[in-house]
Amino acid sequence: MGGESDRTEKMSAALRKAGIRVTRQRIALLGVLADADDHPDAVELHDRARAVEPSVSLATVYRTLSVLESEGVVHRHSFEGGGARFETTHEEHHDHILDVDSGEVIEFQSDKIEQLQDEIARELGYEVVHHRLELYCRKRKGS
Amino acid sequence: MGGESDRTEKMSAALRKAGIRVTRQRIALLGVLADADDHPDAVELHDRARAVEPSVSLATVYRTLSVLESEGVVHRHSFEGGGARFETTHEEHHDHILDVDSGEVIEFQSDKIEQLQDEIARELGYEVVHHRLELYCRKRKGS
DNA sequence: AATGCTTATGAGAACCATTCACAACTGTAA
DNA sequence: TTACAGTTGTGAATGGTTCTCATAAGCATT
């Protein structure tokens, strides 16, 4: 009845081990992130976190997201238009389709594309550190 | 001896035809853009334009870049870190490699990747309006 | 449970790239 | 040359994000 789920408890333990303090505000944000199956921005996360723990400021949301990002717990995306959006890191890497009409975000994954990217970089004397692939799309009519 | 090169003269004519006034400031910016073989940001373009025509404000640089963007004359890129960077639209579409150490930008083009993108989108019921592919890379050691 | 060291927090100011408002100016076509 | 609509410079405004600083609170140790 403590308020932390299994999922966030694991996260907490990992953070504590990394010398990062597990505060009320961070627990709230971790919970919100674990529950999110979309790609919310900082203001949205702030709203959701305050519903659980009113004493969370927007500054802390940003600060915590930065910490979690450098710990590899969340990924930050800067899609076109508007601020950064976040998601918890999950198993496999993926890229995004953005519905330009609805703003919806769909995830996809293509080994072939990843492979081609590496090839291209290698041919030019580079190695890929990370990449960003976003498909801004519209629903096909009469599919 | 007017100051406009062949390249910018063509651009000017096209703009005039589109009902867009060709001002001193815009001529300066068009010249600067035509000469640029890199991917400068607005402040850099402002500096270069002022060297040619001192009466160019930063606001006008931004406004003109927006006009030129919607005319399809320039492309705006929002790479990680820092503001938007611009380049004149040239023949073929291309994507970018960003050297994470030097900040250098290298262009590349891959029909295969474009094709795969279309396929992926189609399978999910979408069609690609535009995309963004950026490879953040580091030079390979001992290649 | 109390201590002490150190990190985290809230509030609001500061920042930075970009856009806006507005009065003065200037292409452009007639 | 005129006249009108588009364009400009200035400086203020905006919006997302980070910073400052005094206060609060983790957490390892007693």
Image (cartoon, coloured by chain):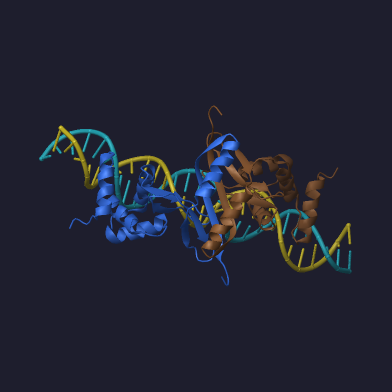
Chain colours: A brown, B blue, C yellow, D cyan
In the image, B63: left or right of A124?
A: left
Residue B97 placement (x, y as % from top left): 51, 58
Seen in the picture, residue B142 relative to A69 is either above or below; the reply is: below
| Residue depicted at 26% across the width and 47% down the height | B12
Asked where in the image residue B1 lies, by quadrant, the reply is bottom left
Q: Looking at the image, which residue sits at the far bottom?
A: B142
Looking at the rendering, which quadrant does residue B35 occupy? bottom left
At x 75% / y 52%, what residue is drawn?
A23
User: Residue at the spot x=49%, y=63% of the render?
Assistant: B103
Asked whether, in this view, residue A28 is left or right of residue A102, the answer is right
Viewer-proximal residue, A115 or A21? Answer: A115
Q: Position of residue A102 (x, y in %)?
A: 56, 34
In the image, residue C4 lies at what x, y percent?
Answer: 79, 68
Lateral position of residue B11 relative to residue A50, left or right: left
Looking at the image, which residue is at 56% across and 49% down? A133
Quarter of the figure that contains the C terminus of chain B: bottom right
The answer to whether B125 appears left or right of B94 in the picture is: right
Residue nearest the viewer, comparing A2 with C27: C27
| Residue B60, x across and y down, in percent | 34, 49
Q: Is residue A53 visible?
A: no
Note whether A70 is above or below A84 in the view shown.
below
Q: Is residue A127 above or below residue A137?
A: below
Relative depth, front residue between A119 and D14: A119
